[in-house]
Image (cartoon, helix red, strand yellow):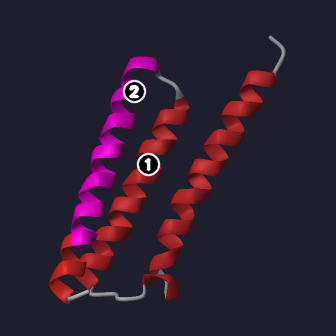
């Protein structure tokens, strides 16, 4: 894929991650459920990752420090899901 096409796709992905994060923030405002905040933060990190890839010209982002941002986003999602599942099991 050409540099321009790659940059366009990467930028579009960053924008879509931002949109998903905004939707999760809206859900959080309605429900005040921490799960939605964690998802919004994770999608914000994914948007940051894609923006850095697009602006930094990284062709292989999986081989550098930039990959750690994506890893942190997925760890945040996993922790949020585990917390939500444990919260439902507590007697009370």
Bin the neighbour count of mark 2 within 10 Å (Cα to Cα): few under 14, some 14-19, many 20 and up.
some
Does 30 sit left or right of 90 as displayed? left
Q: Which residue is mark 2?
A: 27
**Position of residue 63 in the picture relative to residue 58 (left or right):** right
Gap in angstroms between the C-alphas marked 2 and 1: 13 Å
Picture residue at 42% right of the left edge, 28% below the top: 28
Residue at x 27%, y 71% (from the top left corner): 10
Give the total of numbered labels. Answer: 2
Nearer the observer, 34 or 78: 78
Residue 90 in the image, given as x and y percentages of width and height: 81, 21
Percent x, y of residue 21: 35, 44
Question: Which secondary structure, mark 2?
Answer: helix
Q: Is residue 34 above or below residue 9?
A: above
Whether 62 is drawn above or below 27: the answer is: below
* Image position of 85 (left or right of 64): right
Q: Magenta stretch mostly in which secondary structure?
A: helix
Image quadrant containing the C terminus: top right
Where residue 70 sits: x, y (%)? 49, 67
Quadrant of the image occupied by residue 46:
bottom left
Kind of element beneath mark 1? helix
**Residue beneath disc 1:** 41
At label 1, counting other C-alpha atoms closer than 10 Å, the crowd grade (few under 14, some 14-19, many 20 or more) is some
Task: Write the start and end of the magenta stretch as one range.
Answer: 9-31
Which residue is painted at 81% across and 23% down in the image?
89
* Disc with the residue nearer the chain's start (2 vs 1): 2
């Amino acid at each position: 894929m050409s540099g321009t096409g790659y940059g366009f796709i990467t930028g579009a992905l960053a924008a879509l991650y931002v949109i998903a994060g905004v939707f999760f923030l809206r859900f959080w405002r309605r429900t005040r459920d921490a799960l939605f905040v964690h998802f919004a933060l994770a999608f914000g990190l994914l948007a940051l990752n894609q923006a850095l890839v697009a602006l930094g010209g990284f062709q292989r982002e999986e081989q550098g420090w930039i990959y750690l941002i994506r890893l942190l986003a997925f760890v945040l999602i996993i922790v949020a899901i585990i917390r939500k599942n444990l919260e439902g099991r507590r007697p009370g």
